[in-house]
Image (cartoon, rainbow, N blue to C red):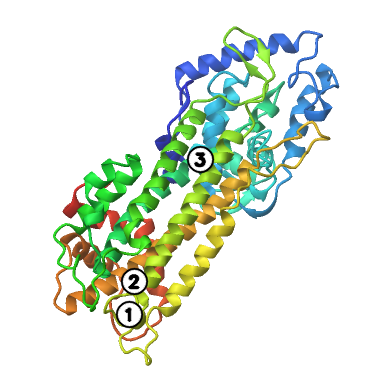
Amino acid sequence: MGTSGTTAQDVIAVARGNARVELSAAAVDALAAAREIVDALAAKPEPVYGVSTGFGALATRHISQDLRAQLQRNIVRSHAAGMGPRVEREVVRALMFLRLKTVASGRTGVRPEVAQTMADVLNAGITPVVHEYGSLGCSGDLAPLSHCALTLMGEGDAEGPDGTVRPAGELLAAHGITPVELREKEGLALLNGTDGMLGMLVMALADLKNLYTSADITAALSLEALLGTDKVLAPELHAIRPHPGQGVSADNMLRVLAGSGLTGHHQDDAPRVQDAYSVRCAPQVNGAGRDTLDYAGIVADRELASAVDNPVVLPDGRVESNGNFHGAPVAYVLDFLAIVAADLGSITERRTDRLLDKNRSHGLPPFLADDAGVDSGLMIAQYTQAALVSEMKRLAVPASADSIPSSAMQEDHVSMGWSAARKLRTAVDNLARIVAVELYAATRAIELRAAGGLTPAPASQAAIKALRAAGVQGPGPDRFLSPDLAAADAFVRAGKLVAAVEPVTGPLA
């Protein structure tokens, strides 16, 4: 951990992979230098916000030296006011790591030993209990960060590496970690950042990258199963509307369909001039979402390079108040991602419905059933997918368009970024399920076509083979469907669909 920020890959490695965290010598030096500045200010009679004053609307009170340690303890205890279900372990680890990133920048005035304790807690696999509700996204993620700071003090509850929740003091003692005794500014510095919403953004981007590539594959499989034309994927068509993501999605689909014996065949009396929008316009919709992911990634990278605190220690030694803790930049892109994820889910469901409707599927059996009437086939799988899409649309309502004043009108405009991040996590989970249902339906439809004598693309065959090897069954009489759908979901979520086709297609973007 250095002084110049961190990377998305590092966040994921710590949050999901339990990677070890170490402070660089440069970070320790920067921490010590900034602390000298804070100590000098603390010794002066003039009040300095966060060092010798109260906080928020109480910043007008000057705090005497004998009460300052109590002040720092009190801000942590009072701000650890979260309620509701526990937040996921990976989110809390990302939250702690990103707060340490800012602390290590040398812009907060925190002592090196406090930063080292933060690293020790992460490395020990100790995860503070953080609750769903308590952050307005300004000043940063106060309540979630406070619950983490409480653990550093040896107070509150935390989860040990064995998954058992115990008093934090017991867990620290069991791992030989001494609780910190906070000094001037340190309590405030541990609470004042966008770390929770940023951590969730970084992980959502990683998950969505996999899902967008997976959705390109399932869109291609549906096009193939519907005997559609791949001519609309020609690169010269997408070159004249040069949105980068659109070209990428079209290329992915074209690679998956290479060598297909299904595309362009029509089994009805009136051959189609054009496929339906949900088939023909998949690159445009998927691609626009990809471009949104790219923009969100730019914002995430900027925030990962930032030192977010108030006040901050500047390179020239000044300690200045600021508004950099406001979560608006992160909140906006979290909401943008929920919108494009909902639209991707929506177009995906439309293709599934088309596969199941005998009036629009061009020769496939109703609901892809084995014996329609006796069997219902995938009728209710589409219901489940539609229910997920409907929730996705509700989750797409922006949280960042809301604001609710707090702290006696001192914090009179807030970002709601934490809320945007929480609903995006649900949206990402739902999108994986929606893509999995399309995969389930499209592979069954392709196998039914193959039974009629048409040869699927080699990439499609590879996807089907891997899916069946993962325990997801193919066409046949009705059976208990939920386990198959859950297995397909796990297959998509783990990146196995992309991994299955890439040996045939080459790397997909």
Disc 1 marks a residue whose amino acid type is Leu
Q: CB atoms at circles 1 and 2 under 8 Å apart?
A: yes
The disc, 3 or 2, on the residue closer to the chain's N-terminal end is 3
Q: CB atoms at circles 3 and 2 under 8 Å apart?
A: no
Task: Find numbered disc 2 in the image and state the secondary structure of the residue it sits on.
Answer: helix
Label placed on residue 225:
none
Task: Find numbered disc 1 in the image and state the secondary structure of the residue it sits on.
Answer: helix
The Cα–Cα distance between marks 1 and 2, rounded to whole angstroms, is: 8 Å
Q: Is residue 57 visible?
A: yes
Q: Position of residue 238 (x, y in %)?
A: 28, 45
The disc, 3 or 1, on the residue closer to the chain's N-terminal end is 3
Depth order, front residue of 412/148: 412
Quadrant into which the C terminus falls: top left
Q: Which residue is mark 1?
A: 368
The disc, 1 or 2, on the residue closer to the chain's N-terminal end is 1
Give the foreground label among 3 and 1: 1
Depth order, front residue of 453/312: 453
For label 1, the crowd category at 10 Å Cα-Cα, with few meaning under 14, some 14 to 19 and many 20 or more, is: many
Give the foreground label among 3 and 2: 2
The answer to whether residue 110 is above or below residue 418 is: above
Identify which residue is drawn at 62% across, 32% down: 193
Q: Position of residue 69 (x, y in %)?
A: 76, 25
With 386 as the anchor, is 463 left or right in this view?
left
Q: Which residue is mark 3?
A: 124
Label placed on residue 441:
2
